[in-house]
């Protein structure tokens, strides 16, 4: 007669198989991993669950989904096959269990920071090919049983069998890598200006076409751009890269932001059919005393001047880039910009949430922007005041402050 423990294990396997079958049958790729990881954490009574998918070209495991280790995914953690715990599982294509991990057993510092003491990992295989690694962790010492291994392997097999997951997630990873490569790794150090920025990729729809840019022009003016291409995923990121480069080129031959955006209209309509983008393009004068601003369907930036409350800049908002320019004329607005004034450009992912009207997000943003405060601190204040832990869309924020004493340009 089977023991009570064996019967319980069999029942647990049957329950999990039914759940995963239903998930594969009714959930789309974007929701499937999240559902599976939640079920695994409950059934195995563990603290962390993570999936790392294989980037075949790089031969690296990419953190793709997690419960209890979400920061790993946000940072886009990568690990070479053969390195660390997950890399060992991938290289051997066999389950690996560690009862009491040591610093040398893992490469990812987040595991140690999370207080994980025991780990169990299994390979994700489809058609004999490695798809990735699924692992769980416990903050208390634990001896994982054969039943635990079987249960986890069952989930890994179900997840790996859904080929669309791999395609969807790796496409998302490629888009994020492209997007990040086009964002400035560091902002330029410019006389009379103090710059800082933040970028948080969206976690519901995946990476999209948000970007920011700062560049100097031969005339001594400084170009400041914040933009958002419609859509999500790799295609939006590719279009964003082409639009960003085109706008830089037009900025070299245009002394007026509106003129540069009008040229961008023609480019987008001809080469990026069916694409639209909102763009904030500002030009800061060599003496830093004024800003020329043109808005293509984009939110006005927040302007904070000493002695005055912060507010959205008073500037007209013209149609997004990609609209027939023969139907309207783009406009530029000249704004005075005194010493210690702050300009904060942003994309809609910062202020929009499904559970609140947009006015709430705008009000929180305006309240967080203050004149006379270092740009880096303004960014910190904004990100603290507005919930950006799990944005539904990309979040881009670019802050520029005019120094109180403008150095020679």
Image (cartoon, rainbow, N blue to C red):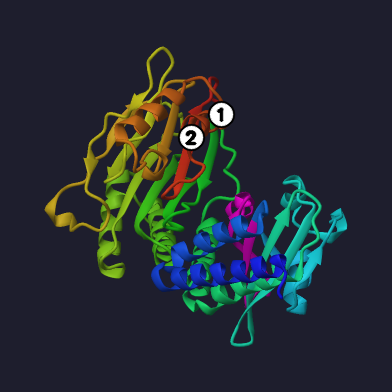
Lower sequence index among marks 2 and 1 = 2
> Residue at left 39%, top 62%?
236
Query: Where is 91 relative to 321, above or below?
Result: below
> Residue at left 32%, top 29%?
313
Q: Residues within 10 Å of mark 1 (few under 14, many from 20)?
A: few
**Image quadrant containing the N terminus:** bottom right
Instruction: Please provide percent x and percent y for residue 153.
Output: 65, 73
> Residue at left 39%, top 69%?
26
Marks 2 and 1: CB-CB under 8 Å? no
Looking at the image, can residue 349 be seen?
yes
Query: Where is 355 relative to 202, above or below?
Result: above
Whether 60 is among the magenta residues is yes
View extreme (top): residue: 307
- Residue mark closest to the camera, 2 vs 1: 2
Pick the residue in front: 300 or 367.
367
Q: Secondary structure at mark 1?
A: loop
**Image quadrant containing the C terminus:** top right
Whether 374 is among the magenta residues is no
Query: Where is 182 relative to 199, above or below?
Result: below
Disc number placed over residue 43 in the picture, else none: none
Instruction: Please provide percent x and percent y for residue 85.
Output: 78, 65
Instruction: Please provide percent x and percent y for residue 383.
Output: 51, 34
Gap between marks 2 and 1 measured at Cα:
21 Å
The residue under label 1 is 408
The region drawn magenta spans: 49-76
The residue under label 2 is 399
Quadrant in which residue 146 is drawn: bottom right
């Amino acid at each position: 007669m089977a023991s009570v423990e064996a019967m319980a294990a069999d029942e647990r396997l049957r329950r999990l198989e039914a759940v995963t079958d239903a998930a594969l049958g009714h959930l789309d790729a974007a929701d499937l991993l999240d559902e599976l990881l939640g079920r695994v954490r409950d059934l195995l009574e563990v603290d962390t669950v993570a999936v790392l998918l294989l980037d075949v070209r790089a031969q690296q495991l990419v953190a793709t989904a997690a419960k209890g280790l979400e920061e790993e995914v946000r940072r886009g953690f990568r690990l070479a096959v053969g390195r660390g715990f997950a890399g060992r599982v991938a290289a051997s294509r066999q389950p690996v269990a560690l009862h009491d991990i040591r610093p040398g057993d893992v490469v990812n510092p987040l595991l140690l920071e999370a207080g994980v003491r025991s780990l169990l990992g299994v390979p994700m295989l489809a058609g004999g090919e490695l798809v990735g690694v699924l692992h769980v962790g416990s903050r208390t010492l634990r001896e994982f049983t054969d039943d635990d291994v079987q249960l986890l392997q069952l989930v890994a097999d179900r997840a790996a069998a859904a080929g669309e997951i791999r395609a969807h997630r790796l496409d998302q990873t490629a888009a994020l890598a492209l997007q990040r490569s086009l964002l400035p790794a560091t902002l330029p150090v410019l006389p009379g200006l103090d710059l800082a920025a933040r970028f948080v990729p969206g976690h519901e729809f995946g990476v999209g076409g948000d970007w920011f840019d700062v560049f100097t022009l031969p005339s001594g003016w400084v170009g400041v751009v914040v933009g958002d291409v419609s859509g999500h995923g790799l295609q939006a990121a590719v279009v964003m890269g082409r639009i960003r480069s085109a706008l830089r080129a037009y900025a070299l031959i245009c002394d007026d932001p509106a003129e540069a955006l009008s040229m961008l209209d023609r480019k987008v309509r001809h080469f990026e059919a069916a694409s639209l983008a909102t763009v904030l393009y500002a030009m800061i004068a060599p003496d830093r005393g004024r800003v020329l601003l043109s808005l293509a369907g984009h939110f006005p930036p927040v302007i904070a001047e000493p002695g005055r409350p912060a507010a959205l800049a008073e500037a007209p908002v013209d149609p997004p880039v990609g609209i027939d320019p023969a139907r309207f004329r783009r406009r530029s607005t000249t704004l005075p910009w005194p010493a210690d004034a702050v300009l904060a450009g942003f994309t809609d992912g910062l202020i929009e949430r499904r559970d609140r009207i947009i006015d709430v997000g705008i009000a929180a943003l305006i309240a967080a922007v203050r004149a006379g405060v270092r740009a880096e601190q303004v960014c910190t204040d904004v990100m603290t005041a507005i919930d950006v832990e799990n944005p539904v869309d990309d979040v881009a924020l670019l802050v520029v402050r005019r120094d109180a004493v403008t150095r020679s340009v």
